[in-house]
Image (cartoon, grey):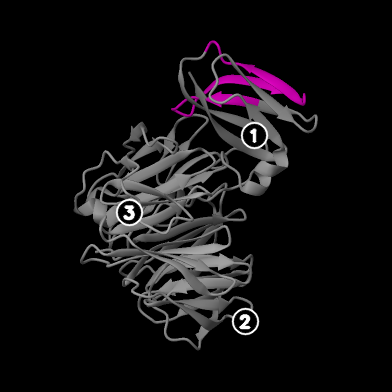
Amino acid sequence: MKNTLLQIAMVLSSVGLFAQNYSNGLFLMNEGNFGTTNGDISFLDYDSNILYEDVFQTENPAEEGFDVLQDFKIVDGDAFFLTKGASNEKLVIADANTFILSATIDLSGAGPQSVTMISESKAYVSCTNEPTLRILDLSGDSISGSVSSSVGSFSAQDYIHINNAMAYIFMGDKLGVIDTDLDSAYNEIFLPDAEIACSGMLLLNDKLFVLTNSGWSGNESRLFRIDIETASVEANIDLSTLGKARLLQSDGEDLFFMIANEVYKMNNLDDIAPSGSFATSSYSDNWDLAYGKSFYVDAAMQEIYIGSAEGYITDGTYEIRDLIDGTSISTQNPSGGIGISQFLISGGVVDVKEINDLNVSIYPQPASDFIMLLFTENQPRELSLLNSSGLKVKVTNSSDKKVRLNLSDLAAGVYVLRIESNKGFYNKKILVY
């Protein structure tokens, strides 16, 4: 049996104009079953709306699938697969656009739990079979040592947050603070009344938020807001009256988490638990939701993704909800893999730096007959509108600073405006009424 709560992680990958292969779509991580090799990645291509199954095995026919695909990340053009099975513990590295295998690092006996990129040449791997963090030399594709600690032993938690040259790892009743230049945990931040498990950690407005819960038993949970400058707890919010909170996410202003099949929302400055839920998932609150539920908030697309691993006995399913009002947009039932335990979007969404670089203003919103786009410079761009199935329903090419897009021929609904230039992609949700 697997021993982790599952999460949705969105990895934002910048690619060039009209990039092909696996550069523009939705990755679905199929974790697979223990003792088998049916873990792999599926890819839903946004341009063709075709689902490609078993991507890694397809591109690397000499390789087997993964025995419990534990973690999957894409960083700086590389895809990282962390597998933890009966006899298949390793980190596999491949090209993020082609998925062609480039390197393998053996982690036998460690029980690898999660991988965190520290730099282009270094990563940390948390392990369940040993109280340490392994240091991986990515330039030499080898293990170079372990992170030292003067503040106690590391647990097998897989929540490490990076901020500048520091990493923060959950250690039960405290956070360990790691100097990533020295690979040493030198300080600690105590979490009063913290529960035994961590189910989310994120940095927002120079504050570190840590969600803890009671693990496999009980319904207790607490949310901590920490000032990282003073290394002190600003808020200790008891969420136990609501239930066991899991899977902390943010849209850059508000915090989101799930309790059973309910989505909760609260402002990052709130010091009390929310009074009610924001949205209700269509998935019933059963054991596989408590055990294999995935959750991700995509601020760029203004959408919420909720997935179920379906007990790891059949194909997983997922639903998409509107981030503004929580209403359901669609439910998907892809085939081709056991259990969906992560989602990653590639290409179609870019990071904050690239969005700012485009310097575009869009109004009005919501819109009825048209929208105006104001750019700060003349540059060739393709402007397209995608419907809820990801298909292009309108395409315009323009180099002008001011562009008017006609919407009068479109049915009311939610669309995605995609701007493509030599700076990459930019997606924004557009509501047409």
Using the image, determine if residue 100 lies above or below residue 390: below
**Three-letter code for the amino acid on which mark 1 is drawn:** Phe
Q: Residue at x 23, y 52 (%)?
A: 288
Q: Earlier in the sequence, mark 3 or mark 1?
A: 1
Q: Residues within 10 Å of mark 1 (few under 14, many from 20)?
A: some
Of tags 1 and 2, which is closer to the observer? 2
Residue 219 seen in this snapshot: yes
The magenta segment is: 383-409
Using the image, determine if residue 305 lies above or below residue 247: above
Using the image, determine if residue 150 lies above or below residue 253: below
Of tags 3 and 1, which is closer to the observer? 1
Q: Is residue 299 magenta?
A: no
Tell me the quarter of the picture where residue 273 sits.
Answer: bottom left
Residue 166: x percent and y percent?
Answer: 59, 72
Tell me the quarter of the picture where residue 62 sits.
Answer: bottom left
* Residue under pointer 1: 18
Q: Secondary structure at mark 2?
A: loop
- How far separated are the C-alphas under marks 1 and 2? 41 Å
The answer to whether residue 165 is left or right of residue 409 is right
Q: Residue furthest bottom?
A: 150
* Residue under pointer 2: 182
* Residue under pointer 3: 38
